[in-house]
Amino acid sequence: MQHMDAEIERLSGITRERALRIDEVNLYERLGEAAFAKLSTEFYRRVFNDELSWFRNIFKSSTIEEATQNQMEFFIQRLGGPPRYSERKGHPALIARHMKFNMSLKAAERWVEHMRAALAATGEIDADSAERMLDFFTHTAYFLHLGCTSRQGPRPVQSS
Ligand code: HEM
């Protein structure tokens, strides 16, 4: 686990302590419901319209509506609000739920780029909150990349 923390920090530039600054304030109470709806809408609008088809296609088994609702409910729950995500879907189990996707380093980088832009586009989210959220999201993206790819094993060499 310590090795994993060090590896996440090396890739993301974010320490675990820094990522956990989301828990020093109740961001749900500070920002309100509408900010979370806007953030996930902005994020998935960018993802589903990404000019990079390899990234866009990671999400092709979901609709934009369900992806937005899943993310919004998870963020609300994790950042101090009601546990709607778990009431509807059970434990978040993020690694297990991401195992079937391309969770490469490039995918994590692209995810974070879209999230950075979505946070900047969400005027309801002040600079201090945005920084805490981006640190946590970035740390989690690389945690998921490492957690999934270490279990997925190497991708097979393509024959064509
Ligand atoms: C590393 C880059 C990432 C990729 C490529 C990725 C990809 C995906 C995809 C394809 C889905 C399915 C969309 C849906 O139907 O909900 C999904 C769902 C989800 N992702 Fe990610 N994700 C990434 C990072 C993250 C991060 C950093 C978080 C949290 C901070 C996160 C939280 C979630 C949640 C809560 C769901 C809904 C899961 C479910 O209920 O099935 N993801 N992700």
Image: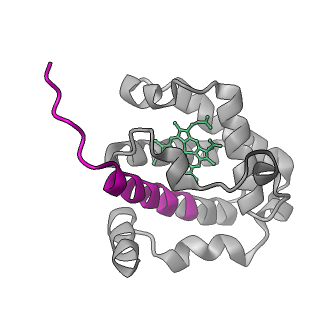
Which quarter of the figure has residue 12?
A: bottom left
Q: Residue 78 location, x and y as percent? A: 71, 61
Q: Residue at x 34, y 63 (%)?
A: 11
- The quadrant of the picture occupied by the N terminus is bottom left
Q: Nearer the viewer, residue 39 or 66?
A: 66
**Residue 35 drawn above or below residue 30:** above
Q: Residue 96 location, x and y as percent? A: 52, 51
The question of residue 159 being in magenta is answered with yes
Which residues fall within the magenta stretch? Answer: 136-160
The secondary structure making up most of the magenta span is helix
- Split into quadrants, the picture shows ligand 1 in the one at top right
The question of residue 12 being in magenta is answered with no
Q: Nearer the viewer, residue 101 or 110?
A: 101
**Residue 36 drawn above or below residue 156:** below
- The quadrant of the picture occupied by the C terminus is top left
Q: Relative to residue 121, is residue 25 drawn left or right?
A: right
**Residue 127 drawn above or below residue 159:** below
**Residue 69 drawn above or below residue 1:** above
Q: Relative to residue 51, is residue 155 drawn left or right?
A: left
